Amino acid sequence: DIVMTQSPDSLAVSLGERATINCKSSQSVLYSSNNKNYLAWYQQKPGQPPKLLIYWASTRESGVPDRFSGSGSGTDFTLTISSLQAEDVAVYHCQQHFSIPFTFGPGTKVDIK
Amino acid sequence: QVQLVQSGAEVKKPGASVKVSCKASGYTFATYTIHWVRQAPGQRLEWMGWINAGNGDTKYSGVFQGRVTITRDTSASTAYMELNSLRSEDTALYYCARTHSSSNSYTSLDIWGRGTMVSVTS
């Protein structure tokens, strides 16, 4: 199974400042035949299901604010919130959908400093 | 609008079975794959398996092999997840979710149900 790790476990950022979350997979999730990274990012607020933010590692889901961006390839990925807003307080999860079983990272909690 | 509506909370005794439903609306049910993901208290999201709602093909996580069965009823636009031989560690919020792409089961999950809480307690 592909093991997903995230860092940090939690972070507190001032409003308007940048938040950066890292995700690492134990094996590459880059599919060579289509050059796509099978990596997604989700946001989960208390009492709500996860919400898809980023797919194929860097494509923003429709309706997601452009302050959210994803980058990386192979085994190392980053989610960046360029200017943190109050409504961004949540837990962020990465997920690989390259091989079964699909696996998730442990989550990173983002708070306001 | 596109949505997945799940059945209500369940309380079960150890050794029992539970069957959770997930009714789809707002899209053509048979053209997407439905996944099941659970979240135990304080734990990471855990993928359980999927069903291709069109042809009924399933795949399961090895962690649940033999204990979980995912089915669907296309006439009711509903998917089901049944988990047997319940133990206390199965206490969790169970989500169904739809694949982002209608032509590929190996994609991210764009539509999620609100979750069904299953509590296993003696």
Image: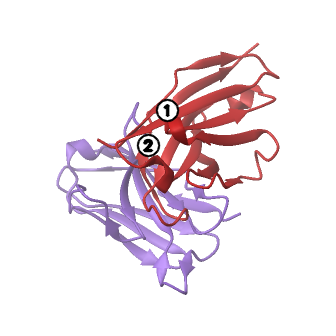
Chain colours: A purple, B red
Residue B17, percent across and down? Answer: 75, 25
| Residue under numbered circle 2 | B112
Specify whether B69 is left or right of B56. right
Residue B78, percent across and down? Answer: 53, 37
Please tell me which residue is depicted at 76% across the width and 45% down the height of the picture. B64
Specify whether B2 is left or right of A9. left
- The chain holding disc 1 is B
Of A11 and A73, the residue lying toward us: A73
Amino acid type, residue under disc 2 in the picture: Trp
Q: Residue furthest top?
A: B122
Q: Quadrant of residue A72?
A: bottom left
Q: Secondary structure at mark 2?
A: strand
Amino acid type, residue under disc 1 in the picture: Gly
- The chain holding disc 2 is B
Q: Quadrant of residue B9?
A: top right
Q: Is residue B72 visible to us here? A: yes
| Residue under numbered circle 1 | B115
